[in-house]
Amino acid sequence: MTTTYAATRETHTIRPGAFGNATVLRCRECGATTPLGAHYACPECFGPLEVGYDYPTITREQIEAGPKNIWRYQPLLPVPADVASFPNTEPGFTRLVRADHLAAELGLRTLWIKDDSGNPTHSFKDRVVAVALTAARELGFTVLACPSTGNLANAVAAAAARAGIRSVVFVPHNLEQQKILTTAVYGGTLVAVEGTYDDVNRLASEIAGEQESWAFVNVNVRPYYAEGSKTLAFEIAEQLGWRLPQQIVVPVASGAQLVKIDKGLRELVELGLVEDTPYRIFGAQASGCAPVARAFKAGHDVVAPVRPDTVAKSLAIGNPADGPYVLDVCRRTGGSVEDVSDDEVIEGIALLARTEGIFGETAGGVTVATLKKLVETGQLDPDAETVIINSGDGLKTLDAIAGKVGPQATIRPTYDAFIEAGLA
Amino acid sequence: MTTTYAATRETHTIRPGAFGNATVLRCRECGATTPLGAHYACPECFGPLEVGYDYPTITREQIEAGPKNIWRYQPLLPVPADVASFPNTEPGFTRLVRADHLAAELGLRTLWIKDDSGNPTHSFKDRVVAVALTAARELGFTVLACPSTGNLANAVAAAAARAGIRSVVFVPHNLEQQKILTTAVYGGTLVAVEGTYDDVNRLASEIAGEQESWAFVNVNVRPYYAEGSKTLAFEIAEQLGWRLPQQIVVPVASGAQLVKIDKGLRELVELGLVEDTPYRIFGAQASGCAPVARAFKAGHDVVAPVRPDTVAKSLAIGNPADGPYVLDVCRRTGGSVEDVSDDEVIEGIALLARTEGIFGETAGGVTVATLKKLVETGQLDPDAETVIINSGDGLKTLDAIAGKVGPQATIRPTYDAFIEAGLA
């Protein structure tokens, strides 16, 4: 069966089945539909577009027979049936870790950690970039690009290298040397921009409008990109034995991850892949960049932008695009949005590492610390099964714990010195 | 069925089946056997001990039904049948990546990368530590310890945290701050020792002799620890569809990983799990610490110690314990041991990242660069299927590429500046 999609690159014809079971782009504001293509704003109202599907019957067995990465969920993503045959970083199917020590420490009955530091470049961004790269290829784009200050830059540069296409990554010129290195090593084009991250972002949008063949993953192919986060929901449900958890705590930057986890869970219910049991979704922010938490607490429907000032830089989006949708999801499901101080973030990182041997990045610290606060304030039910997301790796945010942890003692290299130090 | 083992902790009784199908410790020099226990040197000749097994029938189906980590190979390891039920970091079953771009660049027909940077603390050390921790628990040890300068320290501290037991890690006092942080964050005891790594090692051996309840993973439970590396061989064979590759290139530090990969492949053949097809094993060293390569090239059976001076610090063991066995394996299988300069190591890291999107640590650079040299010098057959090991993560050895890679341009935040820089 041949489906016709709107072509976007002048010389490129989109092949049948390029987007799997996806059929349309739908405006999240006015509901107007647009053919699948390189569109990200509604032609009617300029609202954000989301991928819509016409799902056939999909079975657990069909999914379980797939590869041990996000492509096992190909029928639920806007990607073609042969997606796994193209060279890609094969992200996903990261560990869901039963966290009994952390649960005991916080007074929870059952706690799981979805540890996305296990992805190829050690953050959940590998998921969304893999879907964006696929869409970019199917749409005829020849360059993969992004503005970024960290995880996204790594994921784009690595995915493009693996796929054998060019990447162009724009970063603020004063970025830490280690974040420069971890992107530059993949050999794509890395451009340092004299300005703030906001300046970089604006420049990227301008270039996206001019460079016909460049796919900016989080700009002009954003509807596809964002769908990649649904795989977190799919994996959690499958790894729990095809059922929904009762509570999920998710870090909030743009908010897309939280909103897409909710979308993923609802799709599983609609497809009959899991039983329709109630769940509550909670958002986690750092107090130094908590526009969504503030709006939630104030009972607002809109999110007032803030100027970020937090150690959790991967969550430091002052004007989050999906903020209002996060409010919707958390209110609809009976969850909430909470925020924690930078000191609590550092304590959260150390608590997770000490109790479960998982070294999360600052965003993971935000999530653990928020979980603690949600329990202490009675917002989260300690007897209900809970899942939290660790979205990245502590190796990328070492500065956050520098000076906070270190050796217990420095000794001379003798057994007597060891005994005298009281370490035995 | 109850098996009796020699107890080692005075108040501890080893439970039946504590070591699975393992039955004995056997001297690799004189062949004398010792009961399973906390022994690492032969009581007859002081030679190194290795775990021996009495294998029942083991099927592919049995293994494939197991967990997606090293414990699927429980019947082939010195661990109990219920090993997966104890909290552990669940290492292994990392990706075997088909590397067509790198193969094309080097003129190889079929190349695979076993990417062990996907382990929980991002190196193959998680495998050996998980087995050592299990043996330590079964033997009644209550503390997990090691001397280390990097990957092993991370793996021990994380595994102990996850298991809920105390860790004590000894490091040289002048270690880089980032390696201190990535160990200290797990909250165990970290001891800085005023001296070189050799001093630290000596102190560890002394303490191991005095502290009755401390298991030093790479000292007094080393026979168990080393068996963990067999899982690399098991996974490669299973991921290839239950068959042996024709050539494998393995980095050499102590040499244990290479020797155990060979042991693992031979066990698969003996058990009838794979067909008995010929394979060749190649060792990879940095020229700044190449005692085994030197001995191989000189036709010696013994390995003369060297003083390490290389950027590949995780391979910088000047007096490798398994050196003579590496020579045996490489000669027996028709392989060789080769070494590469530090400049080639850096080029190897960049080559792997650029072609396959995998950012390996310096040891990975050694392996890729050695592969290149083996092809160029005709030692390795470019038409035979080849697997290389990437044993760790580039995020841990960023210093090695600092100043070597970086932005192509720094521009003002305007579209004109972008065009003028010639980046479009």
Image (cartoon, coloured by chain):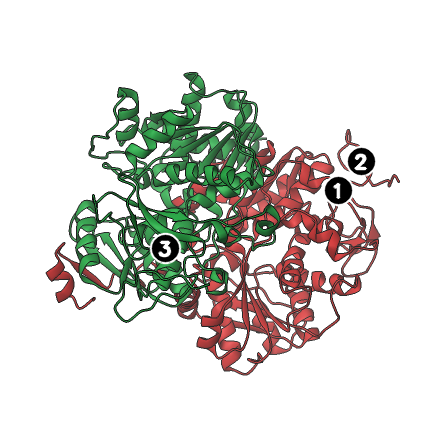
Chain colours: A red, B green
Residue beneath label 3, please?
A: B132
Residue beneath label 2, please?
A: A15
Discs 1, 2: same chain: yes
Asked whether, in this view, residue B308 is left or right of residue B371, the answer is left
> Residue A290, percent across and down?
53, 68
The answer, for residue A194, to whether it is visible in the render is: no
Discs 3, 1: same chain: no
Q: Circle 1 — which element?
A: loop
First in sequence, mark 1 or 2: give its number: 2
Residue beneath label 1, please?
A: A80
Give the amino acid at mark 2.
Arg
Tell me if mark 3 has few (under 14), some (14-19) or many (20+) residues whose alpha carbon lies within 10 angstroms of its own: many
> Residue B59, percent across and down?
58, 47
Asked whether, in this view, residue A321 is left or right of residue B85, the answer is right
Q: Chain of mark 3?
A: B
Rendered residue at 59%/51% (across/down): B62
Q: Quadrant of residue A57?
A: bottom right
Q: Nearer the viewer, mark 1 or mark 2?
A: 1
Give the amino acid at mark 3.
Ala
Q: CA–CA distance between discs 1 and 2?
A: 10 Å
> Residue A332, percent across and down?
71, 74
Which residue in the rendered view is the most extreme toward the front?
B1
Q: CA–CA distance between discs 3 and 2?
A: 53 Å
Q: Chain of mark 1?
A: A
Q: CA–CA distance between discs 3 and 1?
A: 44 Å
Rendered residue at 47%/37% (across/down): B265
